[in-house]
Amino acid sequence: MTPAPGAAPRTAAPRTAAPGTGAGHRSATRPVPLGRRSAAALALTSAAGVAAFGWPLLASPGADLVGHSADAPWLFAALLPLLLAVAVAQVAEGRADGGPGLDAKAVALLGVLAAAGAALRPLGAGTAGIEPMFFLMVLAGRVLGPGFGFVLGALSMFASGLLTGGVGPWLPFQMLAMGWVCTGAGLLPGAAGLRGRRERVLLAAYGAVSSVLYGTVMNLQGWPYLGGMSSSVSFVPGDPLTANLARFTAYCLATSLGWDLPRAAVTVVLCLTVGGPVLRALRRASRRAAFDAPVSFEDGPAGRPTAGDGSAEGTSGR
């Protein structure tokens, strides 16, 4: 059809898919994916954490472990730059390739979730191991990915420590352990297609296991430095690793299992009951934030370019 005289020529604007649905979408499963820089920073931080937790098991006979029980401030001073390195790596990756790095919107979401996690912890902290913040950390790590999850877990534990007055030698170890819990949730299979009840069951099972492992790892932080215990459960420097691990198992069964199992039970119940709405809310928030929407320009009705964000509506996430 020939356009009317004087009418502006009609041009077909390129259609772009909504975030997460296009064929050229870089990461349909992770709003903030884990790139090579972030993975390297996360591996370095985790290696330092494993060394901090496990080095007493390799101590020589007669080693003065009590003299090292106050090393937590040094670990905390080393942990903060490593956590910052993970966040900076996310930012650098987004700027380097134009992908969904840790931008201002992701930082804002990180702050909101960390505040929510810190607010949940006092609801049950110190009461038979009931800690409802675990289920939120597991779900957020699942939706937002391992790199984002590690920073979220560590930051949430730091904020909750300030909120509850739980600042002490254990805090840097708690930050590492909670970061690992969130990272593991982000690495679970089926992030692209597993939804509904099956996903909630998977997250509930992971939440139960990670809740018990969290308590076990935190026991390892203080157990080697405790004196005056029975020889059947106390750490003996220089003994074979298998013998010390057997004593450690007995120590966990005798002291912390009564807190770890309620924590696991609460996490399972919350994942199965309110996990669905929380997962949908987190995914809706990440879609509206449009972490990975590229900036593009389309011809307007009169041939003038208008800015779009890569979404189907050409708006800023509405």
Image (tube, helix red, strand yellow):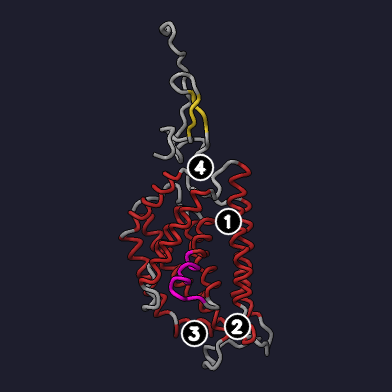
- Amino acid type at mark 2: Ser
Q: Nearer the viewer, residue 183 or 238?
A: 183
State which region is magenta.
156-167
Q: Nearer the viewer, mark 2 or mark 3?
A: 2
Badges 3 and 1: C-beta atoms under 8 Å apart? no
**Which residue sits at x=54%, y=45%?**
100
SS at badge 3? helix
Q: Secondary structure at mark 2?
A: loop
- Category of crowding for the residue at label 3, using alpha-carbon neighbours closer than 10 angstroms: few (below 14), some (14–19), many (at least 20): many
Is 164 one of the magenta-colored residues?
Answer: yes
- 18 in the magenta segment: no
Q: Is residue 9 left or right of residue 241?
A: left
In the picture, which quadrant includes the N terminus? top left
268 displayed left or right of 189: left
The residue that label 4 is drawn on is 292
Q: Which residue is mark 2?
A: 69
> Which residue is denoted by mark 1 in the rendering?
87
